Image (cartoon, helix red, strand yellow):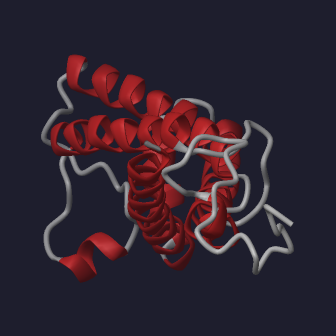
Amino acid sequence: MLRYRYWISLGASVLLGLVFLTAGVGKLLGEGAFLLQVSTLVLNPAVASAIAAILPWVEIVLGTLLLTGIATRIAAGTSALLIASFIYYNGWMISQGFGFEPCGCLGIMERLLGDELSTTQSLYIDIGLLVLALGACFCFPGRLLSIRPWFWNRGSMRDSPPGNNNRKDSAVNGDIKGI
């Protein structure tokens, strides 16, 4: 039972981590363009510059944590909150008539990957990312505050229930029965 949860969590974490790293690096590389786009959409210039300065680093840190599996549940939960704010913002933008405007979600990486995403397309992608974040958060087989990387947990993710130490080679473990 724990094995499928491990793979769901690992797959969701890796996909989400790659998206966050791509978005964060793209925003950092095109910092001026991202700041310009945020300042046209946010009324307060101080808030716009704070978002442009902080958001790329938050995405890079979350992406790194999710890729390495360090503090997976904490990073996935934080990612879910961040993605929920993206969904709210994109929904608000669509309601204001900006559904076909470019979102700037991936920074300059959008140009490298092809076409720019519209706000409506970004909303659909964000809903998928929210599902990944919740999958990584709730399917992670470790404890809530576990900070161990996923590659260290691999040995403990067996199909047997916790506390069941049935091993085929019990003599190897020093457990000699019947003597």
Relative to 32, 127 lies left or right = left
In the rendering, at what x and y percent does residue 111 appear? 25, 76
What residue lies at 71% left-to-right and 40% top-to-bottom? 46
- Please provide percent x and percent y for residue 22: 44, 71
* Up/down of 144 relative to 11, above or below: above
Left or right of residue 154, residue 13 in this image: left
Quadrant location, the N terminus: top left
Name the spot of residue 102 as percent of width and height, x first. 23, 51
Query: Which one is in front, 67 or 20?
Result: 67
The quarter holding residue 31 reads bottom right
Q: Is residue 68 above or below residue 126?
A: below
The answer to whether 28 appears left or right of 15 in the picture is right
| Quarter the C terminus occupies | bottom right
Q: Quadrant of residue 19?
A: bottom left
Please give the name of the residue rendered at 44% of the width and 53% of the height, measured from the top-left corner: 3
Q: Which residue is at the front of the view, 7 or 102?
A: 7
How far across and how far down the image is residue 42, in percent? 51, 34
